[in-house]
């Protein structure tokens, strides 16, 4: 297992050396709650966009102009009544959608552009005009339910992306990997009975939004296709690398997706104001390397990262830099960084999930 995963990661690095990475970025993403104090503020993307324009990263990627999603596309996940409710916020000074989710005059358009940005980059990815991609959008999406906004999210960008990959580009199976600090309740619920979309999440637990215990595994035909790894606060790079190697990798190799979609939340960063994890940019680079290796082996390298949370601006910039460098094949990692956790006994959280998941997967 160890050498197989090493070989996969090394070959991914060589393949990625010819990689062309696509990025969705657009100043219109700054229009959502631009003039209202909120932790999910336009400053987040402004910080990331600044990193892309200078130094090491300048000119290394293909910039993709996003389109807006249409209502009939939003209906793949959301109810018409909910879409109409969000539409009705257009032009209004401020609408409270949920205790921590607001809409400003341009939020409806920005939220449609976030979903459409995921669609646009998927077009490039399936045409193989890019090797991999990162949609740098807001508002985030993984808490958004079929009929309600939640946790700073309006439309579920990544769930709609999985639907788009299947409906428009003929993907039969999609793997969604959600490493955001929080559990992606909206994404889980969107595919809870669906065996074609495997939802895998690591998250702080018990914590907002309350869902994501290890025994939430899907229902009916979808049983086994939801995999939750709930974690107490304080977990570090080693634990995340162990989870991605020992749980995610064998499950992904058995599931054989046609595309991998990643809910990339940088609120797992050790100094994030909302979270209690101890993950560093190197840890995120290491799990990105594992994911790129899996995508290379399983689905011709097709992998799309979509921004979710992350509320420490310095952390966001450092984490983005680490992940993008991995995608461009200019890794910040050394051999020792990748070997972390290999010699150690399995963390008890991981052991519990492995024992439970053995009924569904060859772990
Ligand atoms: Zn989050």
Image (cartoon, rainbow, N blue to C red):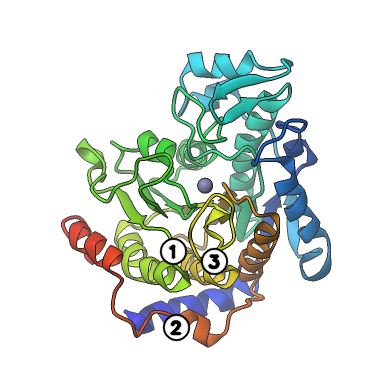
Q: Nearer the viewer, residue 312 or 201?
A: 312
- Of the numbered discs in the image, which one, if any, rests on residue 339? 2
Instruction: Identify whether 13 is placed above or below 49.
Output: below
Query: Which is more N-terminal, label 1 or label 2?
Result: 1
Describe the element under mark 3 as helix, strand or loop: helix
Residue nearer the viewer, 165 or 273: 273
Query: Would you say 314 lies left or right of 181 here?
Result: right
Q: Residue 234 bears which disc, if any? A: 1
Residue 261: give its label. Answer: none
Q: Nearer the viewer, residue 88 or 213?
A: 213
Identity of the residue drawn at 49% across and 57% down: 276
**Residue 47 coordinates in the image, percent (x, y):** 75, 53
Number of labelled discs? Answer: 3
Please, which residue is most extreme toward the left here?
A: 359
- Kindly identify the residue that appears in the image at 78 percent across and 71 percent down: 56
For this orientation, the residue located farthest to the right is 54
**Left or right of 158 in this view: 96:** right
234 relative to 222 in the view: left or right = right
Gap between marks 1 and 3, in whole Å? 15 Å
- Local crowd size for mark 1, using a 10 Å CA cut-off: few (<14), some (14–19), many (≥20): some
Q: Residue at x 69, y 17 (%)?
A: 90
Q: Is residue 65 visible?
A: no
Is residue 133 visible to us here?
A: yes
Dot 2 falls on a residue whose secondary structure is: helix
Question: Residue 67: x, y in percent?
Answer: 69, 34
Residue labelled with disc 3: 284
């Amino acid at each position: 297992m160890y050498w197989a995963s090493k070989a996969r990661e090394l070959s991914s690095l060589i393949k990625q050396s010819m990689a062309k990475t696509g990025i969705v970025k657009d100043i219109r993403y700054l229009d959502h709650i631009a003039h209202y104090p909120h932790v999910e503020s336009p400053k987040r993307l402004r910080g990331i966009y600044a990193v892309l324009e200078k130094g090491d990263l300048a000119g290394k990627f293909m910039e993709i102009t996003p389109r807006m999603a249409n209502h009939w596309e939003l209906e793949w996940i959301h109810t018409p009544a909910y879409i109409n409710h969000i539409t009705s916020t257009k032009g209004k000074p401020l609408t409270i959608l949920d205790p921590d989710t607001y809409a400003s005059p341009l939020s409806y358009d920005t939220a449609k552009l976030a979903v459409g940005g995921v669609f646009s980059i998927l077009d490039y990815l399936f045409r193989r005009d890019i090797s991999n991609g990162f949609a740098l959008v807001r508002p985030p999406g993984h808490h958004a339910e079929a009929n309600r906004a939640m946790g700073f999210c309006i439309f579920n960008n990544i769930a709609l992306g999985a639907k788009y990959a299947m409906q428009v580009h003929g993907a039969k199976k999609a793997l969604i990997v959600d490493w955001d600090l929080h559990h992606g309740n909206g994404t889980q619920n969107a595919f809870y009975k669906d065996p074609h979309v495997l939802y895998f999440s690591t998250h702080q637990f018990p914590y907002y939004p309350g869902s994501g215990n290890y025994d939430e595994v899907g229902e009916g035909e979808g049983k086994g296709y939801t995999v939750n790894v709930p974690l107490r606060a304080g977990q570090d790079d080693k634990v995340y690398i162990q989870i991605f190697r020992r749980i995610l990798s064998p499950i992904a190799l058995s599931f054989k997706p046609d595309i991998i979609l990643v809910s990339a939340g940088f609120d797992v960063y050790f100094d994030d104001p909302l979270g209690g994890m101890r993950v560093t940019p190197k840890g995120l680079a290491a799990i990105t390397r594992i994911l790129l290796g899996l995508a290379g082996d399983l689905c011709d390298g097709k992998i799309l990262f979509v921004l979710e949370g992350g509320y420490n601006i310095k952390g966001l910039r450092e984490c983005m830099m680490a992940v993008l460098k991995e995608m461009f094949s200019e890794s910040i990692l050394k051999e020792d960084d990748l070997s972390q956790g290999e010699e150690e006994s399995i963390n008890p959280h991981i052991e519990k999930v492995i024992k439970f998941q053995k009924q569904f997967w060859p772990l």
